[in-house]
């Protein structure tokens, strides 16, 4: 659903990674924190997070601009629109809210759509996703 770049670890962190790995399989040291029913309850709670029509319209407008941007050969599909809405709901839930703010959308839009776009020259030039975010005004909720 998203593409995140965490970069490379520092040499010290990479060394620690090697040390931990040589201590035995990591999977054996992992403990279960929930079960299938718990995951289902979480999924349902996230789906219950409210997205106002204004925020839904904001998502549609953002993805729509990706389809018309001169540096983007292929913009976001309807699946990108659905993904932005789902990620925004999850962010609101994690932040303890039962509603999505435009800031949730703005904050996660890049990580949710950037890997779904095909740029006109096949490589990153400029910041087309930043252009999209700057060109679409976020709604003000009452």
Image (cartoon, helix red, strand yellow):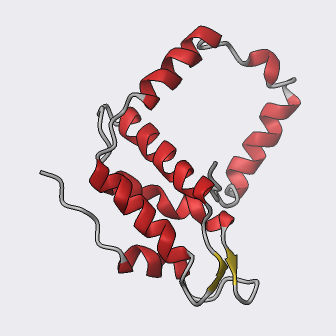
Q: Is residue 44 left or right of residue 135?
A: right
Q: Is residue 80 left or right of residue 87?
A: right
Question: Is 128 drawn above or below residue 111 in the view shown?
Answer: below
Count of marks placed on residues:
0
Q: Is residue 61 left or right of residue 123?
A: left
Question: Is 12 drawn above or below residue 30 in the view shown?
Answer: below
**Which of the two residues, 75 or 108, is positioned nearer the viewer here?**
75
- The structure residue drawn at horizontal position 45% and vertical position 38%, both measured from the top left corner, is 90
Residue 36 visible in the current orientation? yes
Question: Is 92 drawn above or below residue 141 in the view shown?
Answer: above
Residue 35 visible in the current orientation? no
Question: Is 22 drawn above or below residue 74 in the view shown?
Answer: above
**Which of the two residues, 64 or 141, is positioned nearer the viewer here?**
64
- The structure residue drawn at horizontal position 75% and vertical position 17%, both measured from the top left corner, is 29
> Where does residue 50 sit, x and y in percent of width and height?
33, 36
- The structure residue drawn at horizontal position 50% and vertical position 52%, both measured from the top left corner, is 84
> Where does residue 21 sit, x and y in percent of width and height?
84, 33
Residue 111: image quadrant is: bottom right
**Which of the two residues, 21 or 131, is positioned nearer the viewer here?**
131
> Where does residue 121 sit, x and y in percent of width and height?
73, 90
> Where does residue 119 sit, x and y in percent of width and height?
68, 81
């Amino acid at each position: 659903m998203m593409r995140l770049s965490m970069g490379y670890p520092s040499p010290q962190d990479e060394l620690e990674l090697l040390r931990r790995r040589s201590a035995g399989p990591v999977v054996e040291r992992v403990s279960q924190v929930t079960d299938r029913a718990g995951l289902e309850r979480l999924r349902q709670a996230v789906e219950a997070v409210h997205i106002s029509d204004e925020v839904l319209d904001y998502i549609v407008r953002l993805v729509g601009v990706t389809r018309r941007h001169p540096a983007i050969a292929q913009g976001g599909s309807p699946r990108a629109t659905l993904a932005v809405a789902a990620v925004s709901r999850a962010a609101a839930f994690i932040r303890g809210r039962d509603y999505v703010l435009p800031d949730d959308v703005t904050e996660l839009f890049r990580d949710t759509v950037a890997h779904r776009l095909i740029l006109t020259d096949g490589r990153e030039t400029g910041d087309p996703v930043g252009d999209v975010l700057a060109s679409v005004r976020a709604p003000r909720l009452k």
